[in-house]
Amino acid sequence: MFVLTQARYQLFRHRGRTLLMLALSALLAACVCLYIGNIAASQRMLDSLNEAAPAVVHVASHDASSTENLTISAQRLDALAQGGVRDILATSQACGEWDSAGPRENFSGGDTRILGVTCLEAAGFRENTQFAYGDGVDASFLEGEENLCLVDAGYAQAHQLRWVRR
C-alpha cells in the first residue's frame, strides 16, 4: 500500500511534468506504431516488386568473364525454372554422325549438330525472316509449347529429309 501511495504522490506532485511525460510517451508509442506500419508496407512492396519490374538474370562463369558457352547441368537449369525464373534463354548442343560406318575412336563432332533452344532469341535469331517455312506454315507455329524441330535446308537436301506434317 505504501508503494501505491508514494507513486500517486509522485505523479500528482508536479502535474505539468506528469502531463508532459504522458504526452511524450504517447508520441513515442505513435511513432513506433507508424514505424512498424512502414516496415510492413515496405515488405509488401518488396514482395510484389518482381511482378511490377521483373529482374533480368545472367548466369556467368565462376569468374564472371563470360555468359556464353557455359556448361550447366540439367538439374541446375531445372532448379532455375522451378525457382520462379521465367523466359529462360538457354541452348543445348549435341553432335553426331549421320553417315557413320560404325563407331570411331577419335570422334570429334561428325557432320550433324543438334542445337536445342528455349526460344529463337537464345539461338541468336532476332526475327523470323531467316526461315523458309513449309506449305501452310508460318511463324505462328513457333509460339506454341510443343517441342519443334527446325532443319537447315541444305542439310535436309544433303540427307534426303523432307517435310512431314503430323
Image: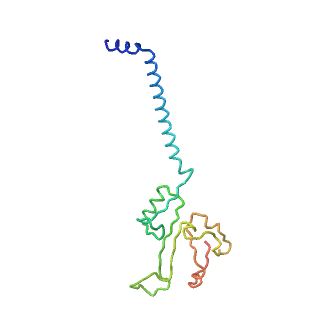
Percent of width and height locating residue 100: 47, 86
Camera-side residue of 10 and 80: 10
Residue 102 vertical placement versus 140 (above, below): below
Residue 25 vertical placement versus 73 (above, below): above
Number of dots carrying numbers: 0
In this view, the residue farthest toward the bottom is: 101
Residue 31 vertical placement versus 49 (above, below): above
Relative to 3, 102 lies left or right: right
Which quadrant of the structure image shows residue 122?
bottom right
Residue at (38, 13) in percent of width and height: 8
Which quadrant of the structure image shows residue 146?
bottom right
Camera-side residue of 59 and 24: 24
Residue at (59, 70) in percent of width and height: 125
Percent of width and height locating residue 166: 60, 71
In this view, the residue farthest toward the left is: 2
Relative to 86, 165 lies left or right: right
Residue at (48, 31) in percent of width and height: 31
Residue 17 vertical placement versus 119 (above, below): above
What is the basis of the colouring in this image?
rainbow
Percent of width and height locating residue 152: 58, 78
Picture quarter with the N terminus: top left
Residue at (53, 64) in percent of width and height: 89
Percent of width and height locating residue 96: 47, 80
